[in-house]
Image (cartoon, rainbow, N blue to C red):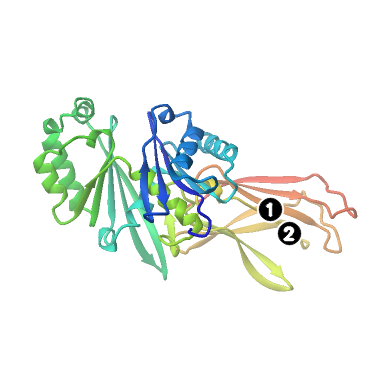
Amino acid sequence: MEQCKGLIAGIDIGYSKIQASVYSYNSRNVQTVKLTEDSKEKTSLANVVAECMRATGTSQIQSICVTIPDYHFDEISAVRDTLKKCGVSDGRWQVLSRVESFAYYAYRQKSELHAAGVALFDYTSEGIRCDYLAVRKNDNSNYLLQEHTGYTSDILKKAVISKELGLVENELCTFAEEYFSKRHVSAAYLTGEGFDVEKLPERFAKLMVTRRKAFVGQNLFAKGACFAAMEILKPEVFKNVIMLLDNHVKCGIEIDISSYEKPMRFRLVRPGSNWYTAGRTVECILEDMRSITFKIITPENKYYDEVVDISEIPFREGKTTRVSVSVSFVDSDRCNITIKDLGFGEFVKSSGKVISKELVLRS
C-alpha cells in the first residue's frame, strides 16, 4: 500500500446520508472523513469520492469499497457505473452489504474481540436487526458463518423517534438477556439511529458488557468498507476463510474436463464469493457428448449433480465443437448456466445455438 499512495476509501451509502473513511498513509490507520452537507446527499457518490481525494491529497484511486443497505442488482450496478465514471478501474472496487463491511471491521480488531464470535445490533425505525458472525472450522477449512435475527415492537419503534431509551430499558434488557443466553459473543457492536444517544440506559449498558466487550458507534460500516478496500490490495483478514454471508454464494460449482489428455476437475465458482462478482465464462472443446454435468459442492462438502442437456448443439469431428460455458448469478442461491456454440474460427461457423438453464443451489 505504501508503494503507490493512491486513495483507499470506504463509503457507506445510507438511506439519508453518506459516510466515508480513508486510509491515512501518515498514521497508517483508517480515519473518518468529515463531509460537507452537499456531499452527504444519497445521489452524490461522485462528490464523496472527490472529497475523499481532497482530504487525503491524492490524485489517483487505489481501491474503493462501497456499502449499501439494500443489496440488489440495480443498486449495485448504479454504484459500479458511478465508480467507473470516477476512474476506478476493474478489480479496484467492491460493493458490499453492510454486514460484510461489519465483518471486515470486527475481524480487523484484536483476536480476543472476535474469538468466540461477534454480534451487530443495528437499531432503526423498524426495530433491531441482529447479525451474529463466527468463524468455524470444518474439514480443514475455515468458514465465516452468519446468523440473522430481528427484534421489534411498537414501543421500540417509537423510542427511535423520541430518543428516550430509558422508556424501553426493560424491553432492551429482556431482548439482550435472551440473545446472549444462546450465543457466545466476544464483542457486541451497537449502531443505528436508535443507539445514537448520549448515554445508554444504565442496566442495559451493564448487561452489554457482562462477559463481553461492547462498543457503540455510527461509522462502523464506512470504516469496515475501508478495511475491505485495503484487503483488495493485500488480503489478510479473510485470506484463508470462506465467507458464507447472506450475499455470498454458499456452494461451489465444478465440471470435469480433460487437460492434455489428463482428467481433472475444473472449478467454475468458488464458495464464499460475492454473488455479484462470482460469475465466470470459459471456453471448451467438446467431445461427442450430449450433456454437461455440473458438480455442486455444498458447505458440508457434499456433492450433487445438475445436468444440462446440450444435444441441440451439433457435434463436429476433429475437435472443432467449441463452446463457451458461462455462469452468472441473480442472487446468492440462483444462477444461470449459458452454453453457446462458438463455431471454430474461419473453418466452422457457429450454429447459433444457445442453451440456458437456471439452477437453484441447495446449500
Rendering quarter of residue 29: bottom left
Q: Earlier in the sequence, mark 1 or mark 2?
A: 2
Can you give x and y, in whole percent of width and height, for residue 144 in the image?
Answer: 38, 57
Q: Amino acid at mark 1?
A: Val
Q: Is residue 128 left or right of residue 261?
A: left
Q: Is residue 1 above or below residue 89?
A: below
Residue for point 35% across, 52% down: 105
Kindly identify which numbered label has been placed on residue 284. 2
Contact between labelled residues 2 and 1, with CB atoms less than 8 Å apart: yes
Can you give x and y, in whole percent of width and height, for residue 132 in the image?
Answer: 30, 50
Q: SS for tag 2?
A: strand
Can you give x and y, in whole percent of width and height, for residue 97 in the image?
Answer: 42, 43
Kindly identify which numbered label has been placed on residue 325. 1
Q: Amino acid at mark 2?
A: Cys
User: What's the CA distance linking mark 1 and mark 2?
Assistant: 7 Å
Crowdedness near tag 1: few (<14), some (14–19) or many (≥20) residues, C-alpha within 10 Å: some
Residue for point 45% across, 54% down: 230
